[in-house]
Amino acid sequence: MKAVFFAEHGGIDKLTWGDFPTPVPGSGETRVRVKACGLNRLDLLLRQGTPGLPVPLPHVLGADVAGTTDDGRRVMVAPGLSCGACPACATDRDHLCDRFDILGQNTNGGYAQFVVVPDRNLLPLPDTIPFEAAAAFPLVFMTAWHALVSLAGLTRGETALIHAGGSGVGTAAIQIARERGARVMTTVGAPWKKDRAIALGAEEAVVRTEEDWATAAARWTEGRGVDVVLDTVGQTTFATDLQCLRRGGRLVACGSTSGREASFDLRSLFGKNITVFGTRLGPRRALEDVFALFKSGQFKPVVDRVFPLAQAAAAQSHLQQNKSFGKVVLTTE
C-alpha cells in the first residue's frame, strides 16, 4: 500500500511518501480502507521526537480515521486504544488503562491507504456524514467533551475561557460550551482568527500574544472571574489561568503547545479553592456521547483545509505554521 511515514525523527522533510507493508488484521481486529485522516498536534511531536513519547520506526502517524471496512461498512475509528479487559476498561474508564495508547503513536495510524484497528474501536458512520468531517471529529471532540462536561461539569449560565480557539480542540470546545448553555471567551493566536471564533459562538476573542487576555477576562466577567478554563497551551498561560478563575473555579489542562513546565503561586490555587484536572483524550463513553450529538446535527467539526495523502508534508507545514482554523485533513481519493 501507499503511506506517508518517517524512518527517523526530525523536520517535515523526514516524511516520506511511498510503499509500506499492507497491515493484516489479527483476531479481534478489522482492516479499514482509509478515506480521510485528520491531523493533530500530536503528529508533529511524534515526528519531531519528544521525550516520553517513543514510537517504533519506521512509523505511520494518524489518530483520526474514517473509512470503510473490507466488507464495505462506513466507519469512524475511536482513537483511544486499550486492553478492553482491565478494571478501568470494564468501568468506562478505558483512558486510565495501563496499556492505553492513541492510534498512530505506538501503532501505525491513518496516514496510509489501510489501517488495522480493534473491532471495538469501530463506530458506524451514517451516509449523511462525509468522511472528511468524520476524520476531523474524534480526538478533539472527545477531548473537549470529557474536559468540559465530564470533568469540569460546565453548566448553563457559567463562563468558560477556552484557549487556542482556532485549534481543533478549541473549535470543538467553543461549540460544546455553547451547547451546554455557557458563555464563552477565547484566546486565539492571530487577529484574523478572532472573527471566526466569534462566528463559531464565542462572545469575546482576544489575540493571546498581543492583548492582555487576563484583563479582558476580568472585564468580561465584571470582576467575578471565569468558572472554567480549558488550557491546551500550557507553560505561557497556566499561572494566569489561576488568576482568571473565580473562587471554586475549575481548570482543565489537556495540552502544552507552548512548553511543558509551568511555575505558579500555590496560594492562587488553594486560596481560591480551585480544582485542577489533567486529561489526555478521554474515555470511549465520552466519544459515544458527543458522537450522538454530531450525528443529530448539533455539532459540526471545522475543517480548515483538505490535502491529498501524498501531500501530508504540506499539510503538516500548514498546521505547524498555525495557518489553520480548525482541522487539517488528509484524503486518499
Image (spheres, rainbow, N blue to C red):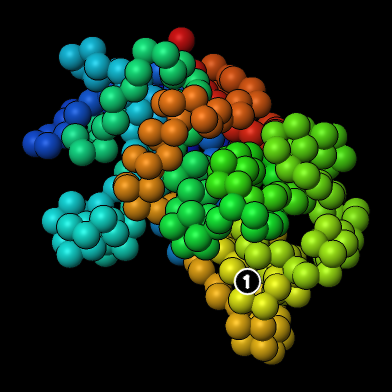
Q: Nearer the viewer, residue 35 or 181?
A: 181
Q: Which residue is mark 1?
A: 249
Task: Determine crowd level at label 1: few under 14, some 14-19, many 20+ residues with C-alpha closer than 10 A.
Answer: many
Image point 70% across, 71% down: which residue?
245
| Percent x, y of residue 186 | 74, 50
Query: How many numbered marks are there?
Result: 1
Percent across and percent down for residue 204 are 81, 47
Q: Is residue 49 visible?
A: no
| Rendering quarter of residue 270 | bottom right
From this viewpoint, is residue 120 visible?
Answer: yes
* Residue drawn at the location 34% of the way across and 52% of the way down: 283
Q: In this view, which residue lies farthest toward the top? A: 333
In the rendered view, would you say 297 is above or below 80? above
Answer with left or right where residue 281 lies relative to residue 222: left
Along the line of sight, the residue nearer the viewer: 257 or 202: 202
Q: Quadrant of the N terminus?
A: top left
Q: Is residue 165 above or below residue 311?
A: below
Q: Position of residue 52 (x, y in %)?
A: 45, 64
Residue at image position (18%, 52%) is 84
Q: Amino acid at mark 1?
A: Gly
Helix, strand or loop for disc 1: strand
Image quadrant assignment for residue 57 = top left
